[in-house]
Image: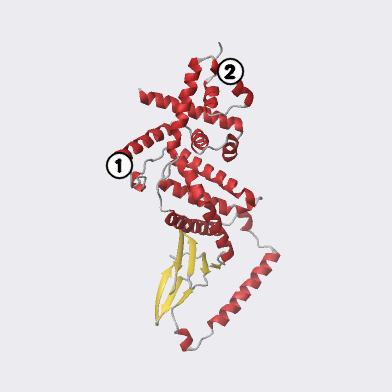
Amino acid sequence: MRHPNQEILALHAGGDLGPFARWRTSRHLARCESCREEVAAFDEVRRSLPGLAEVPDLQWNRLAAEIKANIRLGLAAGECVRSADPPLRQSGLIHGGRAVVAFACAMVLVVTGMVLERPLPRAAREEGPMVQNTQYGIEVTAGGETLGLTNNGVQRVTYSLDAQGSMGARYVDPETGYVTINTVYVQ
Amino acid sequence: MSDDIEPGLELLERQNRFVSEHFRRIFVQIYHLVQNVADAQDLTQEAFIKALQHQEQLKDGQKAAQWLSRIATNTAIDFLRRSSRATFSELEDGLESGWETPEQILLRSEHREYLEDGLRLLSPRERAALIMRDVEGLPAEEVAQRLNCSKATVRSHIANGRTKFRRYMEKRKR
């Protein structure tokens, strides 16, 4: 009598054979005790494995919050690394159209900067703490005193501003390659 | 220095919704493969970051769950290949339920360790195929989709996995 190989028997135990192979194996098993024992052994393996399905009792809400925060951080770090390391094809000449757009944006920024830098009435300035970016990093000014968070001399920094009053600075240290993300919240 | 605009609130909300919808399922799926909470957490994050960074690759939004599952499986398999080890049994992470006696907890922990030792003998893909088929009860077609290979290959992985595990169980009985 020719016996099915181990692979066939292992698959038969889990119902993973095609219809014809299953029929042929079943016929063989009906008259072969040693193969039935083999299948029973594979079946025991299958029955023991669901013990691994158990997941520990976790604080799912806390875990979700942590995971979401880390995902945001990871995405921000990814963006930061991408912007710090432009592909070679972009590092050469700036094409005409792009140069015009870049120039226009720069002009808008300069004009906006000039408008925003106009001295405001003293009362308006002293209403609350102010957060701003300087060439050194992020500075918080309150009650005539200033606290600064420097960017360790890194020149290429991406700043972001939030409607709730927080300011972020992201950069890659050119020497170590470390990504730093600073966020300052003003209350 | 360059100014940049923070991703819009709408985008953030969409990303948050995407993570909320799938996070638990993906965590459990990865946990089954690595059998360790801390690693599962790291790998879940990694899988979501990869997915969100390559959203443009997803043509059909209805297949997002399947696409994400495949990314999660690949991330876990890569991890298993890299580490070729896994740390197991996290009793301290709350496996114990209030109604169990210390003896029951110990027995369950021992049984789990016994199973996990057996899993270590399998290659990452055999392990993934076996867990998806025999632990999660997925049909072979879906296992093949997640592992991005043919059904015949999956069958071969499953058969090898069961055979190795069987040998391990027999050896431990002696």
Tag 1: amino acid: Thr
Q: Nearer the viewer, residue B89 or A174?
A: B89
Q: In this view of the protein, can residue A176 be seen by the observer?
A: no
Residue B108 quadrant: top left
Is the residue marked by circle 2 packed among few (<14), some (14-19), or many (20+) residues within 10 Å? few
- State whether residue B24 is above or below residue A91: above
Residue A32 at x, y percent in the picture:
52, 14
Give x and y (percent) for residue A71: 49, 56
Q: Which element is circle 2 on?
A: helix
Image coordinates of residue A31 in percent, x first then y, are 54, 14
| Residue located beneath label 1 in the image | B101
Q: Farthest residue toward the right?
A: A97
Taking the spot 59% from the left edge, 45% from the top edge, the residue there is B66
Q: Specify the amino acid type for callout 2.
A: Arg
Q: Is residue A44 visible?
A: yes
Above or below, A168 against B33 in this view is below
Distance from disc 1 to disc 2, alpha carbons, whole Å, reads 47 Å
